[in-house]
Every structure is written in structure tokens, then in C-alpha cells.
Amino acid sequence: MTLINGLPAHVLLVHLVVVLVPLTALALVLAAISRRAARRMGVVLPLLALVSLVGVPLTTQAGEWLERHVTDNALVQRHAELGDGLLPWAAGLFVLAALVWWGARATTEPRTDGTGTALWSAAPVRIATVLLSLAVAAGAVVDVYRIGDSGAKAAWHDGFSRTASHASADH
């Protein structure tokens, strides 16, 4: 995907990632901390994480196309390098979201053989899941921020004037 309605696809797709990755991270942490929240979110949690995961390489590929069509400079290169690092975080969000969803299901569904619920109810497993979810969520959000900041600097560096170019009608 290179262009959408005449605009570089990257500048449109990036909004999907900037919104969905932090939203997925927040939802994951809430679901990992609260079984009730996990049950209420249900399958929406792993689906949201899946859409986020798919959005990252689409945005990255569109960004690589755009990189070949803009003036090369250190800011663009830095943004591209940072952008390549988001996929593992998005994959981590997806894996943990699927595990938290599955774990919430395992502790609420009645089992005839008595298996499945003890593992997800065990305090060490719950604590580990919460801590891992917090770490991956924080890493993903910080990475999105760093990538976005570098992209804004690359796009807007020397692209505007500090003073207004036209006199305001109010003054």
C-alpha cells in the first residue's frame, strides 16, 4: 500500500498505530489486573491486539515507500530505524492479550475434569502475568511515543516559520 486518495498511506496509517497500540496496552493492563475487566472485554481484547499487530507492518511498509520518496536526511533515517522496533512490542501485546483472554475464560468456564482453573488462579501466575503485561505495555507505549516524536521532527523540521506569514485579521 503506497497511496490512499493521493496521500502517502503512511501518514494515514500511522494514526491507526498511534491510537490502537496505546489503547491495546491500556486494555491489556486492565484485563491482566482485573479478571472482571478481562471477562467484560472478552474476545475484543485479543482482536484489538491483532488489529494493532497487523497495523504495525502495514504502516512500516508504507513508511518505507515514503522514505524512498522524500529527501533523505538523518531525521528520516532515525524515524525509520525506530519504526522497525515496534513490531516485537505489538507481537508481545498480542500474545499477552490472547493469554489473558484465555486465562479469564479458563477461570470462568465450568470444567468437568477439574483442570484448567487452578493454573490461572494461582497467585504467582497472576502476578507474573500482571508484571509482564505492565512491562510490555509500557515498552510499547514508550516506543510509539519515541517513534512518533522522531516522525514529527522529520516531517516538520524546517517546514514552518516561527513567525506568522500573514497578518491576522484580529490585529
Image (cartoon, grey):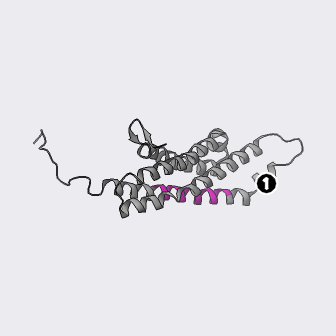
Q: Residue furthest bottom?
A: 74
- Magenta-colored stretch includes residue 130: yes
Q: Position of residue 140 (x, y in %)?
A: 53, 56
Check residue 113 for magenta coloring.
no
Which stretch appears magenta? 129-144
Left or right, residue 111 beside residue 161:
right
* Residue closest to the far top: 5
The answer to which of 149 and 29 lies nearer the viewer is 149
18 on left or right of 105: left
Identify the residue at horizontal 50%, vertical 55% (top origin): 141
Q: Would you say 34 lies left or right of 149 here?
A: right
Q: Which residue occupies 50% across, 51% down?
A: 60
Q: Residue furthest front?
A: 68
Tell which residue pokes out farthest to the right in this image. 113
For residue 48, which quarter of the picture?
top right
Q: Where the C terminus falls, by quadrant?
A: top left
Judged from the image, the secondary structure of the residue bearing numbered disc 1 is: helix
Give the residue drawn at x 85%, y 42%: 111
Specify few, some or many for label 1: CA neighbours under 10 Å numbering under 14, 14-19, or 20 or more.
Answer: some
Q: What amino acid is at disc 1? A: Leu
Q: Residue at x 39, y 59 (%)?
A: 76
Residue 62 image point, x, y percent: 47, 48
Q: How many marks?
A: 1
Q: Which residue is mark 1?
A: 119
- Pinpoint residue 137: horizontal percent, then vertical percent: 56, 55
Overall secondary structure of the magenta section: helix
